[in-house]
Amino acid sequence: MPPDRECFVHIGHTKTGSTSIQNAMGAHRQALARHGVCYPLSPGWGNHALLPAAMAPPGLRENGVHPAFWNGLPPEERIARFQEEFPAEMAALPPETRLVVLSSEQCIHMQPDVASVTRLRDFLMPHFRRVRIVVYLRRQDDHFASAYTQLLRDGVIKPPRLPEGGPRQLPHYDYAGLLWRWARAFGQDAIIPRLFERKLLVNGDAIDDFLALCGAEGSVPPEDANRSSNPSADARGQALMVAVG
């Protein structure tokens, strides 16, 4: 029988404060532990990208995560090590741990079908009484504008435009399909969708909103630098990056 503890899998979405949440959780593990929350190390320090990579279909694994996650090892060897380390880390948790939190926005892209989501479920379920899926959804046009900022920051100086293939070329904006895929594997009651709008977030902040879901309010100080990780830019900022580029 699995231990009497829950697991939250935060699957993103991208451009919804995921990097800030991950960096804050990674930097304040001890404070989280005082609330009975574990943010594991075996899947990664901040971004738990090894979890979706281990369950990804062939072809998505190597291109879906930064090469630094492999620690200089072949992907198959690094993933095999993670699949041994994670159960050991769960078995060593103190009895007062009530919640384990996993977070990787790569889950959106690397679990593109029910089969890959089901593999992730089957990997986690032996360790928990219940697994729930947390996803933040941002209005698609706002997300597109923020994603354009990320391209400019990465040095891709191109005008923003929709793909020629139409909506089918943007499957990550099919939020109904995304929720359906995870609900098929984990059950509809396990899905916790949140709207990424400042007025709807606790204190207008993604980190505080996520901590409230976890019952770990106050674990991250208000002045913590991680609250502004990977910020977006407005139209003037984007124009400046284009000019510099």
Image: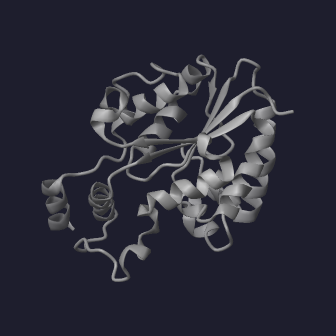
Residue 124 locus on image (x, y percent): 74, 44
Q: Determine the image quadrant of residue 174.
A: bottom left
Residue 56 locus on image (x, y percent): 66, 63
- Does 238 sit left or right of 119 as displayed? left
Which image quarter holds the C terminus? bottom left
In the foreground, 21 or 30: 21
In the foreground, 211 or 93: 211
- Does 165 sit left or right of 101 as displayed? left
- What residue appears at the point 73 percent right and 57 percent down from the top-left corner? 119
- What residue appears at the point 75 percent right and 27 percent down from the top-left corner? 93
Look at the picture and state if 220 lies above or below 57: above
Q: Which residue extends farthest bottom?
A: 164
User: Which color scheme is applied?
Assistant: one colour
Could you tell me if residue 72 is visible in this image? no
Look at the picture and state if 217 lies above or below 155: above
Could you tell me if residue 103 is visible in this image? yes
Look at the picture and state if 125 lies above or below 80: above
Q: Determine the image quadrant of residue 103.
A: top right
- Does 205 sit left or right of 6 as displayed? left
